[in-house]
Amino acid sequence: MSERIYIINLSRIYWSGRRRRGPRAIRHIREFIKRHTKADYVIIDESINMYIFSYAYDKPPRRVAVRVIPVDPEGKVVKAVLAIPITVTTAETPSKSSEEK
């Protein structure tokens, strides 16, 4: 098995209760990868976990792009990481300097 990228739709997670959505999104990602790669064990990287819970515990993103990397040569153990690295940027507010006054 080679490295693959999947875009996983998480909109179905919103059918469940508000407080269950974050953990259920992680379980859904794990089950999706097991189903599509026929792997026995899926390792979820911390970057996916941080991305899911960065929105809020009860408001996971609607879609997530995941890169699946085989850990062992047989493909029974795979690791899932974010396909698109997310960087947190802060908006800089322009301050008035003494020259503009």
Image (cartoon, helix red, strand yellow):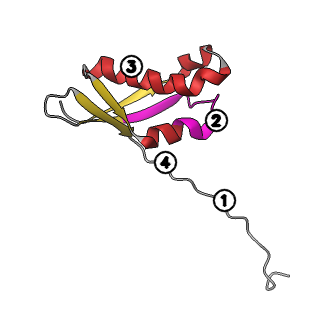
Give the structural element (helix, strand or loop) at label 2.
Answer: loop
Mark 3 / mark 1, whichever is N-terminal: 3
Quarter assignment of residue 91: bottom right
Looking at the rendering, the stretch of residues picked out in magenta corresponds to 52-66
Report the residue marked by disc 2.
Answer: 56
Residue 12 inside the magenta-drawn segment? no
Outermost left residue? 73
Binning the other alpha carbons within 10 Å of mark 4 as few (below 14), some (14 to 19) or many (20 upward) gives few
Going by the numbered disc 1, the residue's amino acid type is: Ala
Mark 3–mark 2 Cα distance, whole angstroms, equals 22 Å
Kindly report which numbered mark, 2 or 4, lies closer to the viewer in this rendering: 2
Going by the numbered disc 3, the residue's amino acid type is: Glu
Task: Identify the disc placed on residue 16.
Answer: none
Mark 3 / mark 2, whichever is N-terminal: 3
Mark 1–mark 2 Cα distance, whole angstroms, equals 20 Å
Report the residue marked by disc 3.
Answer: 31
